[in-house]
Image (cartoon, rainbow, N blue to C red):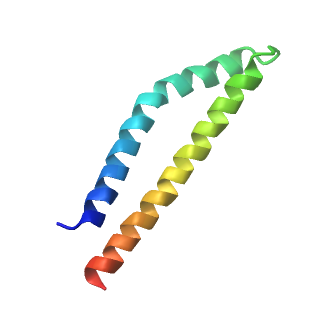
Amino acid sequence: MDLLLWITTGFMLIGLVVLVTMKKGMESKVAFIKANMDKEENSSKAKSVIWWIRSSTAWGVGGIFLVVWWFNNYFG
């Protein structure tokens, strides 16, 4: 097996494990924000949720790029 396949597989699996482990914490932060709409500390919690969404989107785009790149190298 080539190195690109190992990098792609590792990137996808490690990212998936990180997202799954952080999911419960993000759900509790969103629930806290919804319950306490007028609190000052919501700003920092909302920023962390937004960064989590951005980073998971970047992980998904990076994973798609790596998979397409691997298929292009393997079949192309």
Quick check: 76 left or right of 23? Answer: left
Q: Which residue is painted at 66% across and 37% down in the image?
A: 50
Residue 37 location in percent, x, y?
A: 78, 18
Query: Does residue 65 sit above or below 22 in this rendering?
Result: below
Which residue is nearer to you in this view: 30 or 47?
47
Residue depicted at x 21% and y 67%: 2
* Residue at 31% from the left image edge and 78% from the top image edge: 73
Residue 25 percent location from the top left of the image: 51, 23
The residue nearer to you, when weighing 4 against 60, is 4
The answer to whether residue 27 is above or below residue 16 is: above
Q: Position of residue 23 (x, y in %)?
A: 48, 30
Quarter of the image holding residue 75? Answer: bottom left
Using the rendered view, name the quadrant where residue 5 is placed.
Answer: bottom left
The residue positioned farthest toward the front in the image shown: 3
* Residue at image coords 32%, 74%: 71
The quadrant of the rendering that contains the C terminus is: bottom left
